[in-house]
Amino acid sequence: MIPERAQSILDFWFKETPFEMRFKKDDKFDQKIKEKFLNDYELACQNEYDDWQDNPMSCLALVILFDQFSRNMFRNDKKAFAQDQKTRLIVNDAVYSGYLEAMNVDQRFFMLLPLIHSEEISDHEMAYYLLNKYLREHEGYNKIKKFWQDHTKVIRQFHRYPHRNEILGRESTEEELEFLKGPNSSW
């Protein structure tokens, strides 16, 4: 059995939220997530939910809270990325613990997504291995692979995501500024 708040996160994300809303920029949706889950996020940041890592499904809820909900609650704010490092570690531990075996393909996708959000190329390389191992049956496999390749191309070129520079207070290079003028440069 998983904690009630972890189940609330999973129910909201996988049962109540239509797929098309999960990646759409929508102020009302962002506000709804903030109202429902900001307290959980703050408790998790204080390590109050670390025991969620002891179960595959509550671990997934923690990853969604840190990786997905943070990007909604803190859109255009550096707090959106504040837990990325911790989330990478949680995902790695989950993979090595065999947690992906207990998940369906949609759940696996969201468990692995932090590896693509990472600015570390080694995380991207691991993501492709896991994509081929765990997401081949996903109905959106080819779209996922293309989406991930677009992200990895940027990391290989710039060693970071240029669209985060302003938010994170990083100075952009001329090459990055030129890249940001083009299509498919921000996610």
Image (cartoon, rainbow, N blue to C red):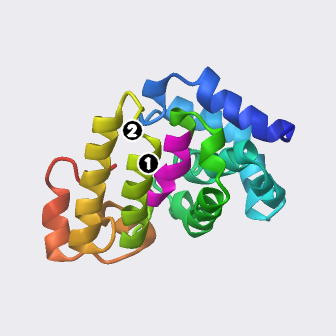
Name the spot of residue 110 as percent of width and height, x first. Answer: 53, 43
Q: Which residue is mark 2?
A: 136
Residue located at (54% from left, 42% from top) = 108
The quarter of the picture where the N terminus appears is: top right
Q: Reply yes or no: does residue 109 show up in magenta.
A: yes
Residue 61 versus residue 11 in the image, above or below:
below
Q: How many C-alpha atoms fall within 10 Å of the one at disc 2: few (<14), some, or many (≥20)?
A: some
Q: Which residues are magenta?
A: 108-115
Q: Is residue 53 left or right of residue 103?
A: right
Q: Is residue 130 visible?
A: yes
Q: Is residue 143 left or right of residue 100?
A: left
Name the spot of residue 31 as percent of width and height, x first. Answer: 60, 36
Comparing 187 with 10, the one in front is 10
Quadrant of the rendered image containing residue 181: bottom left
> Tag 2: residue type?
Arg
Name the spot of residue 149 as percent of width and height, x first. Answer: 26, 53
Quadrant of the rendered image containing residue 8: top right
> Tag 1: residue type?
Lys
Name the element at disc 2.
loop
Q: Reply yes or no: does residue 45 show up in magenta.
A: no
Name the spot of residue 55 as percent of width and height, x first. Answer: 77, 49
Disc sitting over residue 133 in the figure: 1
Name the element at disc 1.
helix
Q: Are marks 1 and 2 in contact (CB under 8 Å)?
A: yes
Residue located at (34% from left, 36% from top) = 141
Q: Is residue 3 left or right of residue 162?
A: right
Comparing 130 with 161, the one in front is 130
